[in-house]
Image: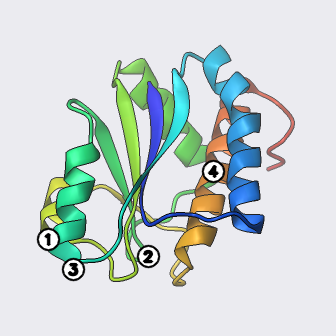
Amino acid sequence: MRLIFLVVGRLKSGPERELVDEYIKRSTPIARSLGFRGIEEIEVASGGGLDAEAERIQAKIPSGAKCLRLDEFGRSLKSTEFADRLGTWRDQGIPDLVMLIGGAEGYGEAVRSQVPDTMAFGPQTWPHRLVRAMLAEQVYRAVSILAGTPYHKA
């Protein structure tokens, strides 16, 4: 299973970009050893309204992908629960897991209806660039949990 971050907006150079890159770099060899095909980021342009952003998001979702929409109103998962879900989806033979991070205004109705499965990093509203860094870290934590490494101390 390939892990894809499908994100509205561009992440410019800076500390958040460095964090995302570092966690993806750390995650990739562990993920590959566990049967994941890799970790990718796909950025789509922001702007033009929710419907335009929704069209750009939908155009980038691979056929047959499982999608998870990050949303402050979504369900909060423990890191171990997230890891278990990744392992289960991988074992089910799902080719791609697309994790969506919407634009500043959220998601268009087309995306909300197409991708009902949600996940939140708590009830707070987070800046998109921090959400991307947090998602990259949680993927690293999840593959570390699945691999049995000591990174996650619960």
Mark in front: 4 vs 2: 4
**Structural distance between the alpha carbons of marks 2 and 3:** 20 Å
Q: Residues within 10 Å of mark 1 (few under 14, many from 20)?
A: few
Residue 113 is left or right of residue 94, and the answer is left
Mark number, residue 109? 1
Marks 2 and 1, the one that precedes in the sequence: 2
Mark in front: 1 vs 3: 3
Residue 29 is left or right of residue 51, and the answer is right
Q: Amino acid at mark 3?
A: Gly
Of residues 51 and 133, the one nearer the viewer is: 51
Residue highlighted by disc 4: 136
**Structural distance between the alpha carbons of marks 1 and 3:** 11 Å
Residue highlighted by disc 3: 49
Q: Residues within 10 Å of mark 4 (few under 14, many from 20)?
A: many
Residue 152 is left or right of residue 89, and the answer is right
For the residue labelled by badge 2, is the local secondary structure a helix, a strand or a loop?
Answer: loop
Q: Are marks 2 and 1 in contact (CB under 8 Å)?
A: no
Q: Position of residue 21 (x, y in %)?
A: 70, 47
